[in-house]
Image (cartoon, grey):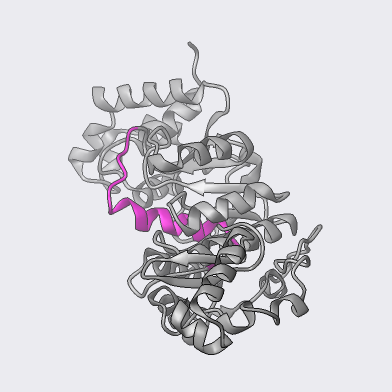
Amino acid sequence: MTHDPGLASWLQLSLTPGLGAAAIRGMLRQFGLPQAVLERKRSELIAHAAPTVVEALDSHAVRDAVARALDWAAAPGHDVVTLADERFPKALLETPDPPPLLYALGRTELLQHASLAIVGSRNATVQGEHNAEIFAKALSNAGLTIVSGLAIGIDAAAHRGGLAGASSTIAVLGAGIDILYPKRNADLAAAIAEHGLLVSEFPLGTAPLAHNFPRRNRLISGLAQGCLVVEAALASGSLITARSAADQGREVFAIPGSIHSPLSKGCHALIKSGAKLVESADDVLAELTGFRRSGYASTVDSSTSSAELSTGLLAHMGHDPVDVDSLCARAGMSAEQVSSELLRLELDGRVTALPGGLFQRLEKGKRG
């Protein structure tokens, strides 16, 4: 099989152990494209990398890794997008540490779309997942491709919403693009590969190791015009993404929640430090300078009128989790009446049961 020598040169640099993105960019600035770099005497490259690293450039292990990557890239729908490729996302070029290349599976044209990162807790609440999905769908319909990290919880909900909207979604992986992680999102990953885009800066076969994810997070924020955090604890990795977004000059948004919920504390901390508090997709769109929305779908479900929400048991629930005894006291109803009404509301998708005998009101629609 004949391979592109230009791409092979990019891969040879990026797949050499110990040769980081900064060193590669230094070589490119001094010598030109990777083919020109590799034509230089190895002694000239030592200014940019340790002698053992430079020696590894020509190793059998690197050449074998290049051959595997070229074979992968030759398959339908597979691609490797380099810094010199016109398809390389311009937003990433503006960041301090762009990767030399991206492995891509799916619709590479999405790399040029205006986009928004939506991230949050893996241990999300039902309401949090629902919020992420409806915000993502509305913003996708407004013309923003939704970027997230394919984790369970908020990330997965954001991807589902992006796929349901007009502008689709990009999943940035913390492992090699040929490694499915997490496995429970296999169906979602397949849908994104078909209708959206999977990307990774990591070589094929890279395991989902913990230290990969902060690097993954800087790409999530770097691809986007802004970052929306839906639910996050104070120690959440989502806050790393938000900090990366702020460092990269992106807008940071956060959805507030209950003062009693640990998953609201990260969002509240962001708001205290200057993130924009948002209650609707309109709040996000209003802050994105230069972005012109296309068709727009509101995050408010018009099928649920304010009159409906103000009557019956829902009026006594508020938006925080509540137990049956408290509802009995608030509504002046018996436990049997409250339990019967809660069951009806749960079947109607208006209420969800939580651990510990608690119930929480949902916006009418999906359960997340």
Question: Residue 182 vs residue 103: left or right?
Answer: left
Residue 218 among magenta residues: yes
Quarter of the picture containing the C terminus is bottom right
State the residue lying farthest toward the left: 52
* Residue at the farthest top position: 1
Q: As displayed, is residue 71 above or below residue 186?
A: above
Instruction: Say which of 68 and 235 sits in front.
Output: 235
Residue 273 at least partly seen? no
- For the point 53% across and 35% down, the residue is 190
Residue 304, compared with residue 296, is above or below; it is below
Q: Residue 325 location in percent, x, y? A: 44, 82
Residue displayed at 70% across by 82% down: 310
The magenta span reads: 205-229
| Residue 244 is covered by the magenta coloring | no
> In the image, what residue occupies the spot 36% across and 42% down?
175
Q: Position of residue 77 (x, y in %)?
A: 57, 28
Q: From the viewer's perspective, is residue 277 above or below residue 60? A: below
Give residue 70's position: percent from left, percent from top: 44, 23
Q: Residue furthest right?
A: 295
Instruction: Identify which residue, 188 or 174, lies in the foreground.
Output: 188
Image label count: 0
Q: Residue at x 39, y 39 (%)?
A: 183
Q: Is residue 112 visible?
A: yes
Residue 112 vs residue 123, the one in the foreground? 123
Report x, y in % for residue 366: 62, 57
